[in-house]
Image: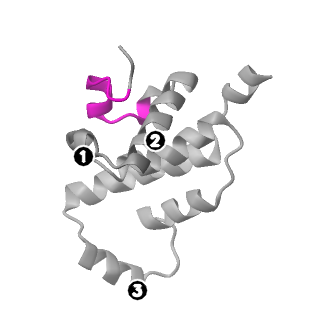
Amino acid sequence: MHQAWIASTDESELERLFKSWRKLSRLETQSGFDGATASTRRSESTGSNFYPWVLTDTATRHRADSARDLLYKLAFWRWSNPNLGARCGAMNSIDAVLYSAFRDLVELTGEEEVMTAFDRRTNLMRNP
């Protein structure tokens, strides 16, 4: 039963939301999108769900039904904190617990594509 909870072959709603969020975040970074522009676009928006903050809000409200879903929820947090690894010595206790849970879920699910380049290069929060 435990293994069935971890294993999942279909792409979940949370996984789709995260992948869409990453694509939009990359496009915004490449186009020099900033907070001021975001506010203008949000106020001019007709309720479109094509903005990263809408996807994040949707993911927050979506119930996780599996370990993969929990991983994708934590992946939103991880990618929203890109300098987390650079300040690992100064990581607050909550970030440390969340990061450790994120790494545990990556190992349990085998979903390594949610890790940042830093996560792949290091063993932060891992026992030797």
Q: Nearer the viewer, residue 30 or 78?
A: 78
The furthest residue to the right: 1
Q: Position of residue 62 (x, y in %)?
A: 65, 56
Tag in front: 3 or 2: 2
Residue 56 in sight here: yes
Side of 10 where 79 appears, left or right = left
Residue annotated with mark 1: 90
- Please state, as top left, top right, bottom left or bottom right, where the N terminus lies in the image: top right
> Is residue 49 within the magenta segment?
no
Amino acid type at circle 2 is Val
| Badge number at residue 43 | 3
Kind of residue indicated by mark 1 = Ala
Q: Nearer the viewer, residue 111 or 16?
A: 111
Q: Is residue 58 left or right of residue 28?
A: right
Looking at the picture, does residue 117 appear above or below residue 93?
above
Q: Residue lying farthest front?
A: 93
Relative to 38, 8 lies left or right = right
According to the image, label 2 marks what residue? 97
Residue type at mark 3? Ser
Q: In the image, what residue occupies the spot 46% across and 41% down?
A: 97
Judge by depth and name the residue closer to the eye, 107 or 113: 107
Q: Earlier in the sequence, mark 1 or mark 3?
A: 3
Q: Going 54% across and 31% down the picture, which residue do you hit?
A: 105
How far, Cα to Cα, is label 3 from label 2? Answer: 36 Å
- Which of marks 2 and 1 precedes in the sequence? 1
Q: Are marks 1 and 2 in contact (CB under 8 Å)?
A: no
Query: Which comes before the other along the chain, label 3 or label 2?
Result: 3
